[in-house]
Amino acid sequence: MSMKKSAKSAMSAKSALRIGAVATGAALALGATGSAYAATPTASPTATASTTGGGRAAAAQARLQAVQALANARLQGRLATLHALSVAVSDSKYLTSSEQSTLANQINSDISGLTALQTKAGSETTAAAVRTDETAMVDDYRVYMVMAPQVRLTEALSAESDAATTLQKAYVALSDLLAKQSGGGTAQQKSQLADLQTQITAAQAAIGNEISVELAVQPGPDASAIQSALAPVRSATKTAHGDLMQARNDAKALRDSLKA
């Protein structure tokens, strides 16, 4: 019996050693695995914040550059328009020297101001600041709404004034010719001569002092007010044009009848 017990005890001891060895191996394996996982690098909160901050900064810079590029294009468009208007003023056949001087001074002032604003917008550090510059570009200058119409309207009204003067001279000449006709001309000729004077007078009344009125219009944030101020001038210009066309037709018909 004692020998059997000894044999069983020996076998139990060997089994215990095997189980212990397996358990120890498993523990070591688990420990190694845990260490391997622990050694895996992970993004630290500081690194993540730094990456996010860098991305935001890059996006803000890209947005700033895009806004600046758009503002620069808009400014260049206005400067190109002003340079074209400057040429039109200097080459005009109808503007008086005073009108040319007034328009040229305003155009040059706008060119100087917008050039400075272009430099300012290009050196801004935020998109909001560039947009503020764009607001000034529109409200403080109004190249398309004020300056360009002022040049066109002044040119048109000055041309119409010249046409009225020429037609008035034609009226005097035709009146003299008609007076030499038997009976002072036919009833139709007399009617044409009278209408010629009526149309000339109406055109001159429409032209009036509209040049001074439209040159007095100033840029500003209220676009509706600007349009309202220029609307009567545009209407007067159109009315004068119609009157002068009718006067020209009267003069031509009367001249042709006197030649017949």
Image: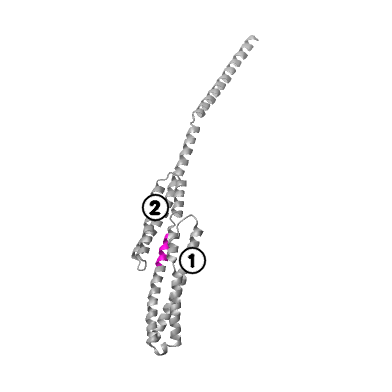
Q: Is residue 147 found left or right of 222 in the rendered image?
A: left
The C terminus - image quarter? bottom left
- Residue 167 falls in which quadrant of the image? bottom left
Considering depth in this image, is 141 or 43 the residue closer to the camera?
141
Q: Position of residue 18 (x, y in %)?
A: 57, 19
Is 180 situated above or below 159? below
- The structure residue drawn at horizontal position 45% and vertical position 81%, both measured from the top left corner, is 194
Looking at the image, residue 24 lies above or below residue 218:
above
Q: Which mark is residue 135?
A: none
Q: Which amino acid does label 1 sit on?
A: Pro
Q: Name the residue under label 1.
A: 232
Is 9 displayed left or right of 161 in the figure? right
Disc 1 or disc 2, which is closer to the eye?
A: 1
| Amino acid at the residue labelled 2 | Gly
- Which residue is the site of mark 2? 113
Q: Does residue 135 show up magenta in the picture?
A: no
User: How many angstroms separate mark 1 from mark 2 (CA)?
Assistant: 29 Å
Q: In which quarter of the image is residue 84?
A: bottom left
Q: Which residue lies furthest to the bottom in this view?
A: 182
Tell me where residue 138 sits by quadrant: bottom left
Along the viewing direction, whichever of 3 and 75 lies nearer the viewer: 75
What is the secondary structure assignment of the residue under circle 2?
helix
Q: What stretch is highlighted in magenta?
A: 147-155
User: What percent of the width, then of the height, locates residue 231?
Assistant: 49, 65
Q: Report if residue 147 is visible in the image.
A: yes
Question: Can you name the residue that lies furthest to the right here?
Answer: 1
Which residue lies at the image location 47% right of the left edge and 71% below the top edge?
A: 239
